[in-house]
Amino acid sequence: MKALLKNTDARRNKFNDQFQKSLKYYFNQNDITNRNNGESKLNNEGKDEILRRADNRVSSNYHQLLVDQEAGYVATIPPDIDVEDDKLNDIIRDTLGDNFNLRMNQLVVDASNAGVGWIHFWFDADNQFRYGIVPPDQVTPIYSSDLNRKLLAVRRTYSQLDPDTGKNYKIHEYWTDKDVTVFKSQLPDYADLAPLNDYFVTRDLTTDDVVGTGNYMAHQFSRVPFIPFSKNKYERPEINKYKGLIDVYDDVYNGFVNDIDDVQQVILILTNYGGTDLQQFMSDLKKFKAIKMDSTDIGDRSGVDKLNIDVPVEARNSLLDITKGDIFVHGQGIDPTKFEVNNATGTAIKMLYSHLELKASVTEAYFRDGLNDLVRAILRWLKAADADGRKINQTWTRTAIQNNLEQAQVVAQLAQYSSDEAIAKANPIVDDWQQELEDRQNDIVKRDGYDNPDALKDVNGGEPDDEET
């Protein structure tokens, strides 16, 4: 275990450094705020210079905007899972839970910041299927070197407080397809690595009494119970696309603010001032609205001049606009300040979302594999027939602004040529198309009467059976 920890440390540390950089920008702690320990601050007296005293450091939160924009676009409505069995569909939906959409949203955020998000699943004491999101910086996967790239094992390392000593120590879980072993350490070289012997508790099934503890547990998953949700082919975080552009924007923006603060400081240049000190000068200026000057002759330059600092407003505004535009282009997002689509057509709205849709489509493609793995794990827990080969259909729904009036007009024009299911799916005011079909059937039956079999025939496309009659 010591050898494994040491051999994976370099890769783990490199991954975590990149993840922490992404998190800093996600929490609006850009590099411009490093001098302020990650806090945006205004400081108009930060430098010990005569003309350039302001040192304002305010970071722009474009990374968080781009990440949350995609997460909201892709995962606000959770994917609909269909295994072609209504009973299994209901159980899977219940097992995934009411907060499935929030977990999918968090996975998109984790994958955007780290390049990959992780889910861990287990069986609780009541043999119920449970799953949770593991922070990416805790997981170090070990893959096979062949083209299948099978997940062979997972090292999970995280900190925990020892209540007896008040010190933090590291817990190292090592998961394979058969078991898990747990160790603990405090020293960076793992010289004090030891089994965490009280991690697992063994109970007598008949009496529920504790019969032993240990650091080892065999499991029945027949696979490593961790599922990756990759962001892209190379599992690279989104911040790599535009970090430099955000830094440029912060530098120009804060330089602009510094210049404005410095310009507000009026600097007077006195030539041949006739007083003795500056306090007398300020007093005479305030009291008499005049000052005394010593002139040697008519041609001398005695007097008071004001030092001006020129601020290149137009050039900086242009650079800020160009940089911000590039941030959204490289980040494949939508600039909310450019969202001028009043009464825009559906085609115009689609064009506005084109870059975001391109990024979301790649994310969906990689997340489909992870979600299939999770559903198959649930099917194996349910002992469903053909759990590993059963077809799994996923329907992903985007959350985007649309022209409902235009969509409704299209639906109305095609209603007589389309099936009820197609119309229900395309209806812009319908959230659940299956419930809409059921409600329409009930409305028709109520309108035409329960004793009219033709009403049921029209809805179902055939003669009613005994139950429907």
Image (spheres, helix red, strand yellow):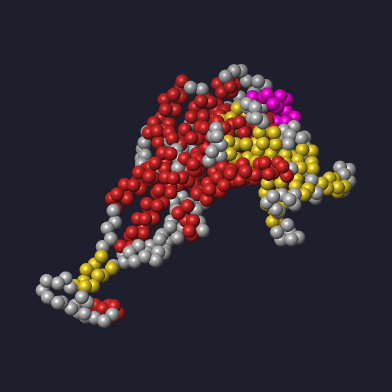
Residue 109 visible, this angle: no
> Taking 383 as reference, is 187 above or below it?
below
Any magenta on residue 259? no
The span picked out in magenta is 379-391
Residue occupying the point 73% across, 57% down: 162
Q: Quadrant of the C terminus?
A: top right
Give coordinates of residue 25: x percent, y percent: 50, 49
* Of residues 180 and 192, the one drawn nearer to the viewer in this rendering: 192
Could you tell whether 90 is left or right of 246 in the image? right
Residue 96 location, quadrant: top right
Residue occupying the point 28% across, 60% down: 309
Give coordinates of residue 449: x percent, y percent: 58, 27
* Of residues 74 and 67, the one drawn nearer to the viewer in this rendering: 67
Q: Quadrant of the N terminus?
A: top right
Give coordinates of residue 173: x percent, y percent: 72, 44
Residue 225 location, quadrant: top right
* Of residues 208 and 448, the one drawn nearer to the viewer in this rendering: 208
Residue occupying the point 38% across, 45% down: 323
Give coordinates of residue 122: x percent, y percent: 72, 40
